[in-house]
Amino acid sequence: MAQYRAPSLPRRRFLRAACGVTLGLPMLDAFMPRRASAQAAAQPPFVLLVVQANGVVQQGKAIDGSTDPERFWPSKPGSLTAAALEADKASRATGELASLADRLSIVKGLGHSFAATGCMHASGDAQVLTAAKLTGDSNRVLALGESIDSLLARKLNEPGREPLVLHAGKYSAGGTGFDIPGYISYVGPSQPRPYVDSPYQAYLRVIEAVGTGEAQPNGPTEEQRLAALRSRSVNDVLRAELRGLLSRTDLSKSDRERLDQHLSSIRDLELAMSGTATTAKLAAETISAMQGIDSAPRDMKNHEKAIDLHLQLMAFAVASGYTRVAVLKIGDREDDHQFTLGGSTFVYHTASHRAVVNGMSLCSQVDFLHMRYFKSFVERLLAVDTPTGKLLDAGVAVWTNQVANGSHSFVNVPWILAGAAGGYLKTGQYVELPNGGYKTNRMLNTLLNAGGLRQDDGSFVDGFGDASQARGLVNEIIA
Protein backbone atom coordinates (compact mmCIF):
# COMPACT_ATOMS: atom_id res chain seq x y z
CA MET A 1 0.00 0.00 0.00
CA ALA A 2 1.27 3.46 -0.88
CA GLN A 3 2.55 5.62 1.95
CA TYR A 4 1.87 9.34 2.01
CA ARG A 5 3.12 12.25 4.03
CA ALA A 6 1.50 15.58 4.77
CA PRO A 7 3.01 19.05 5.16
CA SER A 8 3.81 20.41 8.61
CA LEU A 9 0.82 22.47 9.68
CA PRO A 10 0.55 25.24 12.26
CA ARG A 11 -1.20 24.29 15.48
CA ARG A 12 -4.91 25.01 15.48
CA ARG A 13 -5.98 27.87 17.76
CA PHE A 14 -9.42 28.06 19.34
CA LEU A 15 -11.48 29.52 22.15
CA ARG A 16 -13.39 27.21 24.48
CA ALA A 17 -16.12 28.36 26.83
CA ALA A 18 -16.69 26.85 30.25
CA CYS A 19 -19.72 25.05 28.81
CA GLY A 20 -17.44 23.30 26.31
CA VAL A 21 -18.53 25.10 23.13
CA THR A 22 -15.45 25.63 20.96
CA LEU A 23 -14.72 28.21 18.29
CA GLY A 24 -11.81 27.69 15.94
CA LEU A 25 -9.99 30.89 15.05
CA PRO A 26 -8.63 32.13 11.74
CA MET A 27 -4.88 32.39 11.28
CA LEU A 28 -3.60 35.48 13.08
CA ASP A 29 -0.22 37.21 12.96
CA ALA A 30 -0.12 37.26 16.76
CA PHE A 31 -0.02 33.45 16.86
CA MET A 32 2.96 33.14 14.53
CA PRO A 33 6.51 32.77 15.87
CA ARG A 34 8.38 36.03 15.40
CA ARG A 35 10.87 34.40 13.08
CA ALA A 36 8.36 32.19 11.33
CA SER A 37 9.10 31.37 7.72
CA ALA A 38 6.62 32.30 5.01
CA GLN A 39 5.73 28.59 4.74
CA ALA A 40 5.01 28.32 8.47
CA ALA A 41 2.81 31.41 8.36
CA ALA A 42 0.86 30.33 5.28
CA GLN A 43 -2.76 29.19 5.49
CA PRO A 44 -2.73 25.37 5.37
CA PRO A 45 -4.04 23.80 2.15
CA PHE A 46 -7.56 22.43 1.92
CA VAL A 47 -9.82 20.59 -0.53
CA LEU A 48 -13.58 21.22 -0.63
CA LEU A 49 -15.66 18.95 -2.87
CA VAL A 50 -19.18 19.44 -4.21
CA VAL A 51 -20.71 16.51 -6.11
CA GLN A 52 -23.99 16.89 -7.98
CA ALA A 53 -26.22 14.31 -9.67
CA ASN A 54 -27.96 13.74 -13.04
CA GLY A 55 -25.15 15.15 -15.23
CA VAL A 56 -25.25 18.43 -17.17
CA VAL A 57 -26.68 19.52 -20.51
CA GLN A 58 -23.77 19.18 -22.92
CA GLN A 59 -23.66 18.37 -26.61
CA GLY A 60 -24.49 14.75 -27.32
CA LYS A 61 -27.22 12.14 -27.34
CA ALA A 62 -29.95 12.42 -24.74
CA ILE A 63 -31.44 9.30 -23.20
CA ASP A 64 -34.56 9.56 -25.42
CA GLY A 65 -32.44 9.51 -28.60
CA SER A 66 -32.66 13.24 -29.28
CA THR A 67 -29.55 15.40 -29.53
CA ASP A 68 -28.78 17.95 -26.85
CA PRO A 69 -27.13 21.25 -27.80
CA GLU A 70 -24.12 22.56 -25.89
CA ARG A 71 -25.40 24.34 -22.79
CA PHE A 72 -22.57 23.91 -20.31
CA TRP A 73 -18.92 24.21 -21.38
CA PRO A 74 -17.24 27.52 -22.33
CA SER A 75 -17.21 28.37 -26.04
CA LYS A 76 -13.54 27.62 -26.61
CA PRO A 77 -10.55 26.20 -24.72
CA GLY A 78 -7.67 28.35 -23.54
CA SER A 79 -7.54 31.38 -21.30
CA LEU A 80 -10.71 32.22 -19.41
CA THR A 81 -11.75 35.85 -19.32
CA ALA A 82 -14.66 37.49 -17.60
CA ALA A 83 -15.79 38.97 -20.91
CA ALA A 84 -15.80 35.63 -22.73
CA LEU A 85 -17.68 33.83 -19.96
CA GLU A 86 -20.14 36.71 -19.68
CA ALA A 87 -20.83 36.35 -23.41
CA ASP A 88 -21.46 32.62 -22.85
CA LYS A 89 -23.91 33.31 -20.06
CA ALA A 90 -26.90 33.58 -22.39
CA SER A 91 -26.68 29.88 -23.28
CA ARG A 92 -23.92 28.13 -21.29
CA ALA A 93 -24.11 27.48 -17.55
CA THR A 94 -20.41 28.08 -16.86
CA GLY A 95 -21.02 31.67 -17.95
CA GLU A 96 -22.46 32.20 -14.45
CA LEU A 97 -18.86 32.06 -13.19
CA ALA A 98 -17.68 35.01 -15.32
CA SER A 99 -16.58 37.19 -12.42
CA LEU A 100 -14.33 34.36 -11.17
CA ALA A 101 -12.65 33.64 -14.51
CA ASP A 102 -9.10 34.24 -13.30
CA ARG A 103 -9.60 31.88 -10.33
CA LEU A 104 -10.88 28.86 -12.26
CA SER A 105 -9.67 25.76 -14.04
CA ILE A 106 -12.50 24.14 -16.00
CA VAL A 107 -11.56 20.67 -17.25
CA LYS A 108 -13.29 18.67 -19.98
CA GLY A 109 -12.21 15.17 -20.93
CA LEU A 110 -12.27 13.21 -17.67
CA GLY A 111 -14.22 9.99 -17.28
CA HIS A 112 -14.70 7.08 -14.91
CA SER A 113 -12.58 3.96 -15.42
CA PHE A 114 -15.01 1.21 -14.55
CA ALA A 115 -18.26 0.15 -16.19
CA ALA A 116 -21.40 0.23 -14.07
CA THR A 117 -22.22 -2.97 -12.20
CA GLY A 118 -25.78 -1.79 -11.54
CA CYS A 119 -27.45 1.61 -11.55
CA MET A 120 -25.41 4.12 -13.55
CA HIS A 121 -26.03 6.86 -10.98
CA ALA A 122 -24.86 4.68 -8.09
CA SER A 123 -21.87 3.46 -10.09
CA GLY A 124 -20.84 7.04 -10.85
CA ASP A 125 -21.20 8.01 -7.19
CA ALA A 126 -19.03 5.10 -6.11
CA GLN A 127 -16.14 6.11 -8.42
CA VAL A 128 -16.15 9.88 -8.41
CA LEU A 129 -14.03 10.30 -5.26
CA THR A 130 -12.52 6.80 -5.05
CA ALA A 131 -11.40 5.79 -8.58
CA ALA A 132 -12.06 2.30 -7.24
CA LYS A 133 -13.54 -0.83 -8.76
CA LEU A 134 -17.17 -1.54 -7.95
CA THR A 135 -19.10 -4.27 -6.22
CA GLY A 136 -22.82 -4.94 -6.01
CA ASP A 137 -25.64 -4.45 -8.46
CA SER A 138 -28.92 -2.64 -8.98
CA ASN A 139 -29.06 0.33 -6.60
CA ARG A 140 -26.56 -1.19 -4.14
CA VAL A 141 -23.32 -0.45 -5.93
CA LEU A 142 -20.38 0.25 -3.62
CA ALA A 143 -16.73 1.25 -4.06
CA LEU A 144 -13.89 -1.14 -3.27
CA GLY A 145 -11.63 1.59 -1.93
CA GLU A 146 -11.50 4.66 0.25
CA SER A 147 -12.27 8.15 -1.05
CA ILE A 148 -9.83 11.05 -1.19
CA ASP A 149 -11.61 12.93 1.59
CA SER A 150 -10.84 10.06 3.97
CA LEU A 151 -7.16 10.06 3.04
CA LEU A 152 -6.88 13.84 3.25
CA ALA A 153 -8.61 13.96 6.64
CA ARG A 154 -6.37 11.23 8.02
CA LYS A 155 -3.26 13.14 6.98
CA LEU A 156 -4.31 16.78 7.40
CA ASN A 157 -6.90 16.91 10.20
CA GLU A 158 -6.38 16.61 13.93
CA PRO A 159 -6.01 12.93 14.92
CA GLY A 160 -9.34 11.15 14.75
CA ARG A 161 -11.21 13.98 13.05
CA GLU A 162 -13.12 12.71 10.03
CA PRO A 163 -13.90 14.83 6.98
CA LEU A 164 -17.02 16.96 7.16
CA VAL A 165 -19.37 15.10 4.81
CA LEU A 166 -22.70 16.80 4.13
CA HIS A 167 -25.84 15.96 2.18
CA ALA A 168 -28.58 18.08 0.61
CA GLY A 169 -30.99 15.40 -0.55
CA LYS A 170 -34.37 13.74 -0.05
CA TYR A 171 -33.47 10.33 1.34
CA SER A 172 -32.07 9.17 4.66
CA ALA A 173 -29.22 6.71 5.14
CA GLY A 174 -30.19 3.22 4.01
CA GLY A 175 -33.34 4.41 2.29
CA THR A 176 -35.92 2.15 0.70
CA GLY A 177 -35.50 0.44 -2.66
CA PHE A 178 -33.99 2.91 -5.10
CA ASP A 179 -34.71 5.85 -2.79
CA ILE A 180 -31.27 6.02 -1.18
CA PRO A 181 -28.90 8.96 -0.71
CA GLY A 182 -26.12 7.66 -2.96
CA TYR A 183 -22.63 7.26 -1.54
CA ILE A 184 -19.51 9.20 -2.52
CA SER A 185 -17.43 9.25 0.69
CA TYR A 186 -15.84 5.95 1.71
CA VAL A 187 -14.00 5.03 4.90
CA GLY A 188 -12.69 1.94 3.12
CA PRO A 189 -13.80 -0.83 0.74
CA SER A 190 -17.61 -1.19 0.77
CA GLN A 191 -17.79 1.19 3.76
CA PRO A 192 -19.67 4.36 2.79
CA ARG A 193 -19.48 7.17 5.32
CA PRO A 194 -22.80 8.47 6.73
CA TYR A 195 -23.74 12.01 5.76
CA VAL A 196 -24.78 14.88 7.99
CA ASP A 197 -28.12 15.96 6.50
CA SER A 198 -28.97 18.87 8.79
CA PRO A 199 -26.98 22.12 8.44
CA TYR A 200 -27.67 22.83 12.11
CA GLN A 201 -26.27 19.48 13.23
CA ALA A 202 -23.22 20.07 11.05
CA TYR A 203 -22.80 23.51 12.62
CA LEU A 204 -22.94 22.02 16.12
CA ARG A 205 -20.26 19.56 15.10
CA VAL A 206 -18.00 22.32 13.77
CA ILE A 207 -18.25 24.32 17.01
CA GLU A 208 -17.79 21.03 18.87
CA ALA A 209 -21.06 21.23 20.74
CA VAL A 210 -21.69 17.65 19.61
CA GLY A 211 -19.66 14.80 18.20
CA THR A 212 -16.19 16.01 19.15
CA GLY A 213 -14.85 12.49 19.30
CA GLU A 214 -12.67 13.59 22.21
CA ALA A 215 -13.05 12.45 25.80
CA GLN A 216 -13.41 15.33 28.24
CA PRO A 217 -13.10 13.90 31.76
CA ASN A 218 -15.18 15.89 34.25
CA GLY A 219 -16.06 18.31 31.43
CA PRO A 220 -19.49 19.49 30.32
CA THR A 221 -21.79 16.96 28.74
CA GLU A 222 -23.14 17.25 25.22
CA GLU A 223 -26.53 18.15 26.71
CA GLN A 224 -24.94 21.00 28.68
CA ARG A 225 -23.15 22.32 25.60
CA LEU A 226 -26.39 22.29 23.61
CA ALA A 227 -28.28 23.98 26.44
CA ALA A 228 -25.82 26.87 26.31
CA LEU A 229 -26.74 27.47 22.66
CA ARG A 230 -30.52 27.29 22.95
CA SER A 231 -31.01 30.98 23.58
CA ARG A 232 -27.68 32.52 22.58
CA SER A 233 -25.39 32.67 19.57
CA VAL A 234 -21.95 31.09 19.81
CA ASN A 235 -20.43 34.60 19.90
CA ASP A 236 -22.49 35.36 23.01
CA VAL A 237 -21.55 32.07 24.64
CA LEU A 238 -17.87 32.92 24.12
CA ARG A 239 -18.17 36.62 24.95
CA ALA A 240 -15.72 36.52 27.89
CA GLU A 241 -13.17 34.53 25.93
CA LEU A 242 -13.50 36.87 22.94
CA ARG A 243 -13.08 39.90 25.18
CA GLY A 244 -9.86 38.41 26.52
CA LEU A 245 -8.54 37.71 23.03
CA LEU A 246 -9.37 41.20 21.77
CA SER A 247 -7.56 42.75 24.73
CA ARG A 248 -4.23 41.33 23.56
CA THR A 249 -1.85 44.12 22.64
CA ASP A 250 0.00 42.01 20.08
CA LEU A 251 -3.02 41.77 17.76
CA SER A 252 -2.30 43.66 14.57
CA LYS A 253 -4.84 45.78 12.73
CA SER A 254 -5.12 42.96 10.18
CA ASP A 255 -5.68 40.44 12.99
CA ARG A 256 -8.57 42.49 14.34
CA GLU A 257 -10.08 42.80 10.88
CA ARG A 258 -9.82 39.04 10.33
CA LEU A 259 -11.43 38.33 13.70
CA ASP A 260 -14.28 40.72 12.95
CA GLN A 261 -14.74 39.05 9.57
CA HIS A 262 -14.75 35.60 11.20
CA LEU A 263 -17.27 36.55 13.90
CA SER A 264 -19.49 38.27 11.35
CA SER A 265 -19.55 35.11 9.25
CA ILE A 266 -20.77 33.19 12.30
CA ARG A 267 -23.57 35.69 12.89
CA ASP A 268 -24.55 35.55 9.22
CA LEU A 269 -24.60 31.76 9.29
CA GLU A 270 -26.71 31.56 12.44
CA LEU A 271 -29.14 34.11 11.04
CA ALA A 272 -29.39 32.24 7.76
CA MET A 273 -30.17 29.00 9.58
CA SER A 274 -32.84 30.74 11.60
CA GLY A 275 -34.44 32.36 8.56
CA THR A 276 -34.02 35.93 9.82
CA ALA A 277 -31.55 38.68 9.06
CA THR A 278 -33.07 41.44 11.17
CA THR A 279 -31.17 40.95 14.40
CA ALA A 280 -27.57 40.31 15.36
CA LYS A 281 -28.60 38.09 18.26
CA LEU A 282 -30.52 34.86 18.18
CA ALA A 283 -33.61 34.99 20.36
CA ALA A 284 -35.11 31.87 21.91
CA GLU A 285 -37.93 31.78 19.35
CA THR A 286 -35.36 32.03 16.55
CA ILE A 287 -33.50 29.02 17.90
CA SER A 288 -36.82 27.18 18.05
CA ALA A 289 -37.44 28.02 14.39
CA MET A 290 -33.97 26.75 13.49
CA GLN A 291 -34.62 23.53 15.35
CA GLY A 292 -37.91 23.20 13.48
CA ILE A 293 -36.00 23.16 10.19
CA ASP A 294 -33.45 20.85 11.78
CA SER A 295 -36.13 18.18 12.14
CA ALA A 296 -36.82 18.17 8.39
CA PRO A 297 -33.51 18.66 6.57
CA ARG A 298 -34.66 16.43 3.70
CA ASP A 299 -37.98 18.21 3.17
CA MET A 300 -38.20 19.36 -0.45
CA LYS A 301 -39.14 22.90 0.54
CA ASN A 302 -35.83 23.21 2.42
CA HIS A 303 -33.64 21.79 -0.36
CA GLU A 304 -32.19 24.95 -1.88
CA LYS A 305 -31.70 26.54 1.53
CA ALA A 306 -29.90 23.40 2.70
CA ILE A 307 -27.50 23.61 -0.26
CA ASP A 308 -26.63 27.21 0.54
CA LEU A 309 -26.22 26.59 4.28
CA HIS A 310 -24.03 23.54 3.76
CA LEU A 311 -21.77 25.53 1.45
CA GLN A 312 -21.52 28.30 4.04
CA LEU A 313 -20.63 25.71 6.66
CA MET A 314 -17.88 24.23 4.50
CA ALA A 315 -16.25 27.65 4.14
CA PHE A 316 -16.60 28.34 7.86
CA ALA A 317 -15.21 24.91 8.81
CA VAL A 318 -12.04 25.57 6.82
CA ALA A 319 -11.66 29.19 7.94
CA SER A 320 -11.93 28.13 11.59
CA GLY A 321 -9.46 25.27 11.20
CA TYR A 322 -11.99 22.57 12.07
CA THR A 323 -11.15 20.54 8.97
CA ARG A 324 -9.02 20.68 5.83
CA VAL A 325 -11.45 18.65 3.75
CA ALA A 326 -15.21 18.68 3.35
CA VAL A 327 -17.69 17.11 0.94
CA LEU A 328 -21.22 18.06 -0.08
CA LYS A 329 -23.42 15.62 -1.98
CA ILE A 330 -26.28 17.43 -3.73
CA GLY A 331 -29.14 15.09 -4.55
CA ASP A 332 -29.20 11.38 -3.85
CA ARG A 333 -28.51 8.25 -5.91
CA GLU A 334 -30.26 10.44 -8.45
CA ASP A 335 -31.58 13.94 -7.85
CA ASP A 336 -35.37 13.64 -7.59
CA HIS A 337 -35.99 17.12 -6.24
CA GLN A 338 -38.88 19.14 -7.57
CA PHE A 339 -37.91 22.56 -8.86
CA THR A 340 -40.00 25.48 -9.99
CA LEU A 341 -37.98 27.45 -12.53
CA GLY A 342 -39.13 29.76 -15.30
CA GLY A 343 -42.75 29.12 -14.39
CA SER A 344 -42.45 25.33 -14.70
CA THR A 345 -42.59 22.82 -11.85
CA PHE A 346 -40.82 19.54 -12.57
CA VAL A 347 -38.88 16.64 -11.05
CA TYR A 348 -35.24 17.11 -11.97
CA HIS A 349 -34.35 13.46 -12.65
CA THR A 350 -37.46 12.96 -14.77
CA ALA A 351 -36.50 16.00 -16.84
CA SER A 352 -32.95 14.66 -17.21
CA HIS A 353 -34.48 11.66 -19.00
CA ARG A 354 -36.39 14.14 -21.21
CA ALA A 355 -39.66 12.63 -19.98
CA VAL A 356 -41.26 16.05 -19.50
CA VAL A 357 -41.95 18.83 -21.99
CA ASN A 358 -38.87 21.02 -22.51
CA GLY A 359 -36.81 18.65 -20.36
CA MET A 360 -33.50 19.77 -21.86
CA SER A 361 -34.23 23.44 -21.24
CA LEU A 362 -35.40 22.76 -17.69
CA CYS A 363 -32.27 20.76 -16.86
CA SER A 364 -30.12 23.54 -18.29
CA GLN A 365 -31.84 25.95 -15.90
CA VAL A 366 -30.86 23.66 -13.01
CA ASP A 367 -27.26 23.72 -14.26
CA PHE A 368 -27.34 27.52 -14.20
CA LEU A 369 -28.80 27.43 -10.68
CA HIS A 370 -26.07 25.17 -9.36
CA MET A 371 -23.37 27.27 -10.98
CA ARG A 372 -24.76 30.25 -9.08
CA TYR A 373 -24.51 28.28 -5.83
CA PHE A 374 -20.92 27.35 -6.63
CA LYS A 375 -20.13 30.97 -7.50
CA SER A 376 -21.48 32.13 -4.14
CA PHE A 377 -19.43 29.44 -2.40
CA VAL A 378 -16.21 30.51 -4.11
CA GLU A 379 -16.92 34.17 -3.43
CA ARG A 380 -17.32 33.35 0.25
CA LEU A 381 -13.87 31.73 0.30
CA LEU A 382 -12.47 34.67 -1.63
CA ALA A 383 -13.85 37.11 0.93
CA VAL A 384 -11.92 35.56 3.83
CA ASP A 385 -8.52 37.16 4.50
CA THR A 386 -5.52 35.29 5.92
CA PRO A 387 -2.04 36.57 6.87
CA THR A 388 -0.78 35.60 3.42
CA GLY A 389 -3.74 36.42 1.18
CA LYS A 390 -7.23 35.21 0.38
CA LEU A 391 -8.42 31.92 1.86
CA LEU A 392 -9.35 30.66 -1.61
CA ASP A 393 -5.76 30.98 -2.81
CA ALA A 394 -4.54 28.54 -0.16
CA GLY A 395 -6.68 25.62 -1.28
CA VAL A 396 -9.13 24.46 -3.89
CA ALA A 397 -12.93 24.27 -4.14
CA VAL A 398 -14.19 21.66 -6.58
CA TRP A 399 -17.50 21.09 -8.33
CA THR A 400 -18.16 17.87 -10.23
CA ASN A 401 -20.92 15.40 -11.05
CA GLN A 402 -21.53 11.68 -10.68
CA VAL A 403 -22.13 11.34 -14.45
CA ALA A 404 -21.62 13.49 -17.54
CA ASN A 405 -25.21 13.96 -18.72
CA GLY A 406 -28.80 12.78 -18.44
CA SER A 407 -28.03 9.65 -20.47
CA HIS A 408 -25.59 8.56 -17.73
CA SER A 409 -22.41 8.79 -19.78
CA PHE A 410 -19.13 8.28 -17.91
CA VAL A 411 -17.26 10.30 -20.57
CA ASN A 412 -16.67 14.06 -20.17
CA VAL A 413 -17.74 14.18 -16.54
CA PRO A 414 -17.38 17.89 -15.71
CA TRP A 415 -14.80 19.20 -13.23
CA ILE A 416 -14.48 22.82 -12.15
CA LEU A 417 -11.71 23.89 -9.77
CA ALA A 418 -11.49 27.27 -8.06
CA GLY A 419 -8.35 28.31 -6.22
CA ALA A 420 -4.62 27.89 -6.77
CA ALA A 421 -3.86 25.60 -3.80
CA GLY A 422 -0.96 27.75 -2.67
CA GLY A 423 0.39 28.07 -6.20
CA TYR A 424 0.22 24.37 -7.09
CA LEU A 425 -2.62 24.82 -9.60
CA LYS A 426 -2.93 26.97 -12.69
CA THR A 427 -6.03 29.14 -12.87
CA GLY A 428 -7.79 31.20 -15.51
CA GLN A 429 -8.11 28.44 -18.09
CA TYR A 430 -10.51 26.03 -19.77
CA VAL A 431 -8.76 22.80 -20.68
CA GLU A 432 -9.97 20.18 -23.16
CA LEU A 433 -7.79 17.14 -22.47
CA PRO A 434 -6.04 15.44 -25.40
CA ASN A 435 -6.27 11.93 -26.82
CA GLY A 436 -9.76 11.17 -25.61
CA GLY A 437 -9.08 12.47 -22.13
CA TYR A 438 -8.00 10.97 -18.82
CA LYS A 439 -9.61 8.86 -16.13
CA THR A 440 -10.97 10.16 -12.85
CA ASN A 441 -8.02 8.81 -10.84
CA ARG A 442 -5.70 11.39 -12.43
CA MET A 443 -7.84 14.24 -11.17
CA LEU A 444 -8.02 12.67 -7.71
CA ASN A 445 -4.22 12.36 -7.65
CA THR A 446 -3.99 16.02 -8.61
CA LEU A 447 -6.36 17.04 -5.80
CA LEU A 448 -4.44 15.01 -3.21
CA ASN A 449 -1.31 16.93 -4.16
CA ALA A 450 -3.26 20.19 -4.05
CA GLY A 451 -4.14 19.29 -0.46
CA GLY A 452 -0.44 19.03 0.34
CA LEU A 453 0.04 15.26 0.30
CA ARG A 454 3.18 13.74 -1.17
CA GLN A 455 4.61 10.25 -1.41
CA ASP A 456 7.11 9.30 1.27
CA ASP A 457 10.03 10.18 -1.01
CA GLY A 458 8.61 13.68 -1.56
CA SER A 459 7.37 13.03 -5.10
CA PHE A 460 3.84 13.76 -6.24
CA VAL A 461 1.04 11.32 -5.42
CA ASP A 462 0.15 9.61 -8.70
CA GLY A 463 -1.26 6.19 -7.82
CA PHE A 464 -4.48 6.71 -5.86
CA GLY A 465 -7.39 4.44 -6.68
CA ASP A 466 -7.43 0.96 -8.15
CA ALA A 467 -3.96 -0.19 -9.19
CA SER A 468 -5.17 -1.36 -12.62
CA GLN A 469 -5.43 2.26 -13.81
CA ALA A 470 -2.64 4.18 -15.51
CA ARG A 471 -0.87 6.37 -12.97
CA GLY A 472 -0.60 10.09 -13.48
CA LEU A 473 -1.84 13.62 -12.89
CA VAL A 474 -3.74 16.22 -14.87
CA ASN A 475 -0.51 18.01 -15.72
CA GLU A 476 -2.36 20.57 -17.83
CA ILE A 477 -3.67 22.29 -14.69
CA ILE A 478 -0.50 22.08 -12.56
CA ALA A 479 1.53 25.28 -12.34
Image (tube, rainbow, N blue to C red):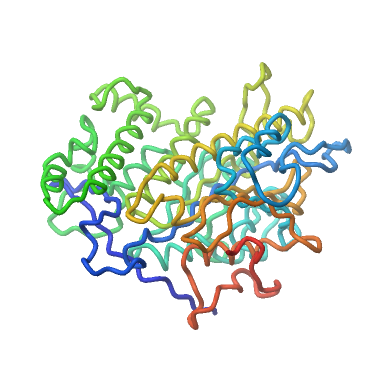
x, y percent for residue 403: 70, 48
Tag count: 0
Seen at 36% across and 41% down, the residue is 201
In the picture provided, is 455 more to the left or to the right than 264? right
Comparing 118 with 371, the one in front is: 371
Q: Compared to 458, does 383 lie above or below?
A: above
Which of these two is toward me, 356 or 419?
Answer: 419
In percent of width and height, residue 35 lies at: 24, 69
Q: Is residue 142 above or below residue 280?
A: below
* Picture quadrant of residue 52: top right
Instruction: Indicate the position of residue 72 as horizontal and vertical percent values.
Output: 72, 40
| Location of residue 239 in the rendering, given as x and y in whole percent from the top left corner | 15, 39
Left or right: where 383 falls relative to 473: left
Residue occupying image coordinates x 78% and y 25%: 358
Q: In this view, does 292 lie above or below 62?
A: above
Give the quadrant of the C terminus.
bottom right
Q: Which of 315 and 193 is in front in this view?
A: 315
Q: Quadrant of residue 238?
A: top left
The residue lying furthest to the right in this view is 65
Taking the image as shown, residue 50 lies to the left or right of residue 390, namely right
| Residue 19 visible from this viewpoint | yes
Task: Name the residue at the bottom extreme.
Answer: 457
Q: Is residue 139 visible?
A: no
Image quadrant occupied by the N terminus: bottom right
